[in-house]
């Protein structure tokens, strides 16, 4: 007899109907109850198995299979209990119960780690509440975004699948489209003409609501509304692509109307060109005027010398004095013409005349030019630490030369002591030239930087009153400022500021060509 035969062997056991006194009612109650339970226990696993096979994403499939085994084994036990009333297969009943015990404990042990995961799963009510809360958040974010779009001064057009999805009020204003227009914005854009060469192969609709393509950064687009020149709108446009997960992408076009700005720039360029032409004509006039003035002055000086040599005995003391006045006046006029010409030739430094220079060597070059005056006066000039800046070196040498020369000239009875220093300032440096000279009354501060403004007579101090005016013009051409601090009898300190990165005061390309020939390179 095999193992299966032994399992279903009934020898040695009576049927349950013959064990004790069973009434038909009680016996059939047990039989029918066990059969009903067995049928339910077999139906439940079938339903669970069908569910798992259809929902392969269900997170507790292993646990479900253990429940199926446990419930099916329980159903087998109840089915055997009903059969035993006629066939006493108690050995099979014991094996079935043992299998049920194993399945039940396996299910129990599997439930322990699955319990926290099961507790973390949300109920439909919780999910619905979360969906509602998230929906409210999205609606609030959408309202904020729409508010931001409405408040932007630049136009924004959002498109997807070559159809415009959203347009802010600024875009409507810039493009001159009414929200109540019967025609959609696509139709209006399609009627516009691109008037610039860059967009010759495109239309306005492709620019604003085209398919996803290469991003565009600050493209200048000219839209023509009509035949007249004033019907052209100049837009500065940037276009970027975007993509939403599991959805097709789109395009965001951001633009602003720069028609007025471009017109102002064109006007400014025209004015700069006119200013450049005027400056060139002024320089030519200054050169011609100085030349025409210098020629008769040379004649006056020459003939004055001849008169003095040839007719000195005839002129006498008074005539000789008058000739001295004449010669001195001609000499002064010559000096004034030279200084005026020098002042008029100071031009803004451009890319060719400007370079990165250490200022200390430039100050030393100015000292070498003034070496004779320094030796004669016994002046002591100390150059402190000076920065390295982007400057026109010849001009800055002239600034140091004029300031040092002023300090030596207005020294009074003391030995000149001059100190050149620097300090860091917002966006640049301040260079200071301090002396121990006669000083300046504060009420004359506004006058000293003007052309031909002198505070002393020629008998007291020589000069033309142009040196400080040249300093002011050079510093301002470097986008700096010049000022003075002084007290009568206690010396003066001239300050001038220089930025780290000076910009030309006008377009350097519009500057009259040619070297002015005023300063050393």
Image (tube, rainbow, N blue to C red):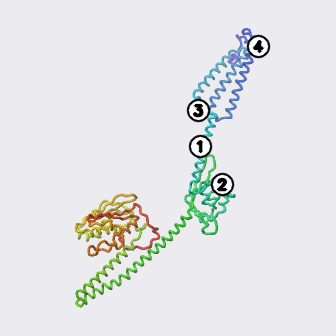
Q: Quick one: 246 or 121, which is closer to the camera?
A: 121
Q: Is 239 rendered above or below residue 102? A: below
- Residue 120, labelled with which disc? 3
Residue 466 is marked as: none
Label 1, on which residue?
A: 137
**What kind of element bears circle 1?**
helix
**Disc nearest the viewer among 4 and 2:** 2
Can you name the residue that lies furthest to the right here? 24
Give the class, few, some or many, for how many residues have Cα within 10 Å of label 4's Cα (few <14, many ≥20).
Answer: few
Q: What secondary structure is marked by label 3?
A: helix
Q: Mark 4 or mark 1, which is nearer to you?
A: 1
- Please give the count of numbered marks on the rendered protein: 4
Q: How far apart are the two marked residues, 1 and 3, measured between alpha carbons?
A: 23 Å
Sequence-first disc among 3 and 2: 3
Q: In this image, 281 relative to 152: left or right?
A: left
Q: Name the residue that disc number 2 marks.
A: 163
- Where does the image place residue 52, in percent across and percent down from the top left? 67, 32
Instruction: Please give left or right for residue 133 compared with residue 467 in the image.
Output: right
Looking at marks 4 and 3 on the same chain, the residue that comes earlier in the sequence is marked by 4
**Residue 25's mark?**
4
Counting residues from the start of the chain, the first of labels 2 and 1 encountered is 1
Report if the CB atoms under discs 3 and 2 are less than 8 Å apart.
no
CA–CA distance in space, label 4 to label 2: 80 Å
How far, Cα to Cα, is label 3 from label 2? 43 Å
């Amino acid at each position: 007899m095999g193992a299966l035969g032994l399992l279903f062997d009934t020898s040695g056991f009576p049927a349950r109907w013959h064990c004790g006194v069973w009434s038909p009612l009680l016996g059939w109650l047990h039989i029918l109850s066990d059969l009903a339970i067995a049928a339910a226990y077999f139906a439940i696993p079938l339903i669970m198995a069908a569910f798992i096979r259809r929902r392969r994403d269900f997170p507790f499939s292993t646990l479900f299979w253990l429940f199926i085994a446990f419930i099916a084994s329980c159903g087998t036990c109840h089915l055997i209990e009903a059969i035993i009333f006629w066939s006493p297969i108690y050995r099979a009943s014991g094996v079935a119960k043992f299998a049920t015990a194993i399945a039940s404990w396996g299910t129990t042990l599997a439930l322990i780690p699955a319990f926290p995961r099961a507790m973390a799963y949300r109920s439909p009510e919780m999910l619905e509440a979360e969906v509602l809360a998230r929906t409210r958040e999205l609606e609030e974010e959408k309202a904020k975004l729409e508010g931001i779009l409405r408040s932007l001064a630049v136009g924004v057009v959002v498109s997807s699948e070559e159809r415009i999805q959203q347009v802010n009020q600024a875009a409507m204003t810039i493009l001159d489209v009414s929200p109540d227009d019967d025609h959609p914005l696509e139709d209006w854009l399609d009627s516009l003409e691109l008037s610039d060469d860059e967009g010759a192969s495109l239309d306005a609709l492709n620019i604003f609501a085209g398919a996803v393509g290469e991003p565009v950064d600050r493209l200048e687009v000219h839209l023509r509304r009509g035949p007249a020149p004033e019907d052209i709108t100049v837009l500065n446009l940037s276009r970027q692509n975007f993509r939403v997960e599991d959805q097709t992408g789109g395009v965001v076009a951001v633009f602003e109307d720069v028609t007025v700005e471009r017109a102002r720039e064109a006007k400014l360029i025209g004015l700069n060109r006119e200013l450049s032409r005027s400056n060139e004509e002024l320089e030519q006039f200054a050169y011609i005027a100085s030349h025409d003035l210098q020629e008769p002055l040379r004649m006056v000086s020459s003939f004055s010398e001849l008169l003095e040599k040839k007719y000195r005995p005839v002129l006498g003391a008074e005539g000789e004095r008058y000739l001295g006045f004449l010669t001195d006046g001609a000499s002064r006029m010559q000096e004034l013409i030279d200084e005026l010409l020098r002042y008029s030739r100071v031009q803004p430094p451009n890319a060719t005349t400007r370079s990165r220079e250490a200022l200390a060597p430039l100050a030393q070059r100015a000292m070498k030019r003034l070496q004779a005056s320094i030796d004669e006066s016994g002046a002591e000039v100390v150059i402190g630490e000076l920065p390295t800046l982007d400057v026109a070196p010849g001009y800055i040498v002239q600034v140091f030369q004029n300031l040092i020369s002023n300090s030596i000239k207005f020294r009074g009875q003391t030995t000149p002591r001059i100190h050149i220093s620097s300090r860091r300032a917002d966006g640049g440096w301040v260079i200071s030239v301090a002396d121990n000279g006669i000083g300046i009354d504060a009420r004359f501060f506004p006058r000293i930087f003007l052309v031909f403004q002198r505070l002393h007579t020629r008998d007291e101090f020589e000069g033309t009153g142009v040196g400080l005016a040249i300093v002011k013009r050079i510093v301002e051409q470097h986008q700096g400022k010049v000022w003075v601090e002084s007290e009568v009898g206690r010396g003066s300190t001239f300050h001038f500021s220089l930025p780290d990165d000076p910009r030309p005061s006008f377009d350097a390309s519009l500057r009259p060509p040619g070297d002015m020939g005023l300063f050393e390179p």
